[in-house]
């Protein structure tokens, strides 16, 4: 078995460079797993998650290094409590952050989520 060790990988036109670390990260530019209080359980490329209203619903997710524009896509999922479904809506995309609105589908009496996760692709 042979081992190839390189610092950068490029296509034949010298574009689309990737480091081995970026490839290992799946070329996702940023990701986060957060608890209901905005605590970061694990992340890559995310500096902070802030619960904006202290209600476990609206979070500002900030990038470690801002992008050059807002041409990025966010895929998100939410955990829930009491067997109630939950959804994440992405709002207010800025170069340095976005807002994740976490809402349960169980009505007003059961709004608390138990955390969420997001992955970010930049184009």
Image: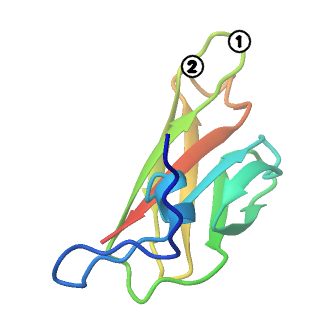
Residue 25 visible in the picture: no
Give the mark nearest the N terminus, 1 or 2.
Answer: 1
Residue at the (48%, 79%) spot, across then down: 94
Q: Which corner quadrant of the image does residue 86 belong to? A: top right
Are the residues at dot 1 and dot 2 in contact (C-beta closer than 8 Å)? yes
Secondary structure at badge 1 equals: loop
Identity of the residue furthest to the bottom in this view: 68
> What residue is pinned by disc 2?
106
Residue at the (66%, 24%) spot, across then down: 80
Q: Is the residue marked by circle 2 packed among few (<14), some (14-19), or many (20+) residues within 10 Å? A: some
Q: Is the residue marked by circle 1 packed among few (<14), some (14-19), or many (20+) residues within 10 Å? A: few
Please, is residue 102 above or below residue 110 in the view?
A: below
> What residue is pinned by disc 1?
82
Q: Nearer the viewer, residue 11 or 104?
A: 11
Identity of the residue furthest to the front in this view: 1
Which image quarter holds the C terminus?
A: bottom left
Q: Which x, y percent locates residue 65?
A: 61, 82
Q: Which x, y percent locates residue 118?
A: 54, 49
Q: Nearer the viewer, residue 96 or 105?
A: 96
């Amino acid at each position: 078995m042979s081992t190839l060790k390189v610092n950068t990988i490029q296509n034949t036109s010298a574009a689309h460079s990737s480091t081995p670390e970026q490839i290992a990260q799946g070329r996702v530019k940023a990701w986060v797993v957060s608890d209901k209080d905005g605590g970061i359980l694990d992340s890559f490329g995310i500096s902070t998650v802030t619960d904006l209203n202290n209600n476990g619903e609206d979070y500002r997710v900030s990038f470690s290094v801002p992008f050059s524009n807002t041409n990025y896509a966010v895929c998100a999922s939410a955990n829930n409590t009491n067997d109630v479904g939950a959804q994440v809506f992405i709002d207010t995309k800025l170069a340095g952050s976005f807002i994740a609105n976490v809402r349960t589908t169980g009505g007003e009496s059961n709004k608390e989520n138990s955390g969420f996760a997001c992955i970010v692709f930049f184009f």
